[in-house]
Image (spheres, coloured by chain):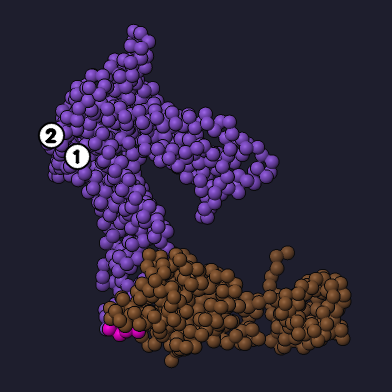
Amino acid sequence: MINLRRNKDLAAVEGRRIGLDSIMTVLAFVLLLVIVVIPISMIIYNAFFFEGKFTFGLIVDQLTRSTTMSSMWNTVKIGGLVTLFGTIVGVFYAWLLGRSNIPGKKLMRSLFTIPYMFPPFLGAMAWDLLLNGRSGYLNRWLMQTFNLSSAPLNINTVWGIVFVEISYYFPFVFMQVVSALERMDPTLEESARIAGAKQGTVIRTITLPLVVPAISAGALLILISSLAHFGVPAILGFSQGIFTLPTRIFAVISRSGGSFEGIRQAAALSILLVIVVALALLLQRKVLSSGGYDIIKGKSMRPTLINLRGARIPLFIVALVTLVVIVIVPLVMIFLVGLVRAYGLPLRPENFTLANYARIFTTSGTVDSIKNSLVLAISAGVISMVLGTLIAYVVQKIKPKGTGVLEILSVLPYSIPGTVLAIGVILAWSGSLRVNLYNTLWIILVAYIARYLSFSMKTSSAALLQVHPSLEEAARTCGATHTESLKDITLPLIRPAMISGFFLIFLPAMREVTTSVLLYGPYTRTLGVQIYSLRDAGMMPQAAALGSVAIVLIIVINAIVNAITADRKGV
Amino acid sequence: MAYVRFENISVSYGDNQVLKNFSLSLEKNEIMCLVGPSGCGKTTLVRCLLGLTRPDEGEIYVDDRCLFSSKRRINVPAERRGIGIVFQDYAVWPHLTVKENVAYPMRKKRMKKEDIDRRVRDVLKQVSMSEYINHLPGQLSGGQQQRVAIARALMSSDDLIVMDEPITNLDAKLRDQMLNEIRDIQRNLGTTIFYITHDQKAALHLGDQLAIMNEKGELVQIGSDEDIILRPKSRFIFEFIGVTNFIPLKRVDSGYKLDLGREMIPWPESVPEDAEQIKLLEMGTRPNDITFDDASPIRAKVKRAVFLGSEYDYFIELGDREIRVQQSTLDAALVGVAKEGTEVGLRFLNPHYYEAKRREA
């Protein structure tokens, strides 16, 4: 034993130092107060208090307007339909790719996750270009070919919105269920076969019930996302006067030109949206209430694949067509329209030009928007990663009094629609609390951190749970201080999770439009906002060109992420 | 004076009092095994010694250095206690190589690089892991990871190592091997080892001294292996340490009779005085303390005989009761194996007398 430090032991009398643990705990609480509690409280305050007095007036006023009621009804209808059909589609393809002998599984699996990265509002733009009631390319072609007097298909309807949202949200269920199916203990199904059940009976009575928790987790994600979704209904619905609550809030804000009255109305609408989301969550919990099963074994065992026999090729074609429709068609459409000289010209090579792409890099507004999005996505990613890990550490390892509150506060913004969060951030940080961040990038950053904090908090939490306390304790007994044990042991062990947490935030932040469309100022347009405004101004080819750049950017970054994470698994 | 001293340690988690006024001493250069059933507070005691759990009250000394004292408000932080620990789950850091794992304690002491390298090589040789020096723990088996953990503990301290159920996760054969290796290392280095286990066999195998705890977290006996096996202080220890047979004794006139349910037969041995005070008396024996003797008046029937290589294990019907008897293969060769279904006479050696447990009706 070395005696160098022994004289210090005399100073090891208790109670003199403030521990690292208590610093982290206090920090976690303060940060969540600022980032989450204040904006949410501001919405509630402004929706229920008028000139310092409590009143239901504002809410009642909103509820008596027919526009509000129709937006609410649209929100619920679209959310419900998207969840229902998205879940069905997701489960079907999860089973097909996870458990059958359909050809080309590996490639199809990665293609099926593309919609997950693809910004839905770009998809909506693509479908609008194809199937717009008046001017869609496909509609015009159909009218010419079959001599029709009116457009046969119209995407600018509630069903059109539902269709586009399904194609971007079904991967939530697909990915959850496919991984549950693949990791399911195959003996569960084999025992049923041995007990005399037919293939179909096994699927119906064993496989499906066992993946219900995964299905319901995925369906919940679809429901929350769809109810809060802004991009698709904004692009497809505005022209036809079809509003959902998030797009109505946006319309109220933009029509009022930033006046306080408009923001108060938006606050009241936000409360209604939160209520709708909360009711939907309750309902969903009732419908899909089920205990979790421990069906997943740690050992990797290959589940038996089901032979589709004669249905193999037809089902393969169905899957292929689905992929072409939801992935390839919108992608190609955006790239092609980005090439045409002027909007409306037929998509023929003689009309193509690279000028739109060139203009992206020469127009300062557009270049700035790419820069802004990069700066925002990187800083939101880094900050949320650090804060999320800090909170996860406090929740998982320190477990102070009020851990539950901490946990709820950090996950809460996830189920709060981005539109509502934006209203809260406007109310909190544009001067009313003596801090004015309006029209700066900071206000968007604060909103992003609140919105994405739970992503990194969840991945870091899961990683920290894997780090057994004895690993840190072993370091302590080896002579490491608390700080050193964190630095030498815990942080290196959860580093991969922190990095994947970063990209989980970086990618959606890169293409974000819902919150930034409410928060941007003249010099703080984001990539999403810029595409949206270009389209709004009728500059369709430029919007499409910028959209293509965004897609390429996201695909490249995603490929880099996959390469990095694949590398890490090898260690 | 003892090398390690726990004095009146009390620990509670919320309302749950785990340890109350617990005292225990360890002598230098010996292996002390602390044995007790799961959840009796063994691990809590270890955590107090390491500085990972703060006792509510009491004092802890190692080599006259006070590590904890509630009265004097001393609580040396874990990193300055300089005690080696081997955890049940090894706690080998998965992101560091064997070398980095083992070198960690010395790096924290800011030793010179050459010194560290030399020590690491020495210690890895001790635990026969030299060839794995640059492996990551994921590439090692459970037993090898355990060796790394022991090597790391040796780097923390040559003087005192705590092992908390270090071999529970290994298979039976490897367990024996590891126990022998731990024993050898201790003999070579003279390290004091505080070994915590719920497995009385491992404790008997390893310990110079055994300390037995009951499920209430009280220390019930300290002694050598012979003390514990031959002279258990209480029925709890007697039962805890191995397989036992109990037969009630009834007082009849001036003597005692074995209560076999449907009949009573006179008990040929004399009952010690202090046992005579007990109302409901039971006689306890271990299976290997019962021998076959055709001359004995205690008659029984062999129900089943199992040959286990080094011994025969019998299930024997004695009246309405079933008892276990063990016969070493050597004895069996000398006296003969009792066949299933035959009648035998039994003789009880080294009987213990305890109060009967209250049985539920």
What chain is colored brown?
B
Task: Tell me which amino acid carries mark 2.
Answer: Thr
Left or right, A108 with respect to B331, comes to left
Nearer to us: label 1 or label 2: 2
- Residue A378 at x, y percent in the picture: 23, 48
Quick check: can you spot residue B137?
Answer: yes
In the image, A341 versus A68, the foreground residue is A341
The reply to whether the magenta stretch includes residue B181 is: no
Q: Residue at x 45, y 82 (%)?
A: B126
Amino acid type indicated by mark 1: Ile
Q: Position of residue A315 (x, y in %)?
A: 51, 31
Report crowding for label 1: few under 14, some 14 to 19, many 20 or more residues within 10 A (C-alpha). many
User: Mark 1 vs mark 2: which is more N-terminal?
Assistant: 2
- The residue that label 1 is drawn on is A370
Question: Which sits in the foreground, B340 or A327?
Answer: A327
> Seen in the image, is A290 located left or right of residue A335?
right
Label 1 SS: helix
Both marks 1 and 2 on one chain:
yes
Chain under callout 2: A
What is the x, y in percent for residue A541? 21, 26
The chain drawn in purple is A
Highlighted range, magenta = A1-6
Q: Which mark is residue A437?
A: none
Residue bearing mark 2: A363
Q: Tell me the element at label 2.
A: loop
- B24 or A418: nearer the viewer: A418
Q: Is residue A4 magenta?
A: yes
Quadrant where the image shows the C terminus of chain A: bottom left
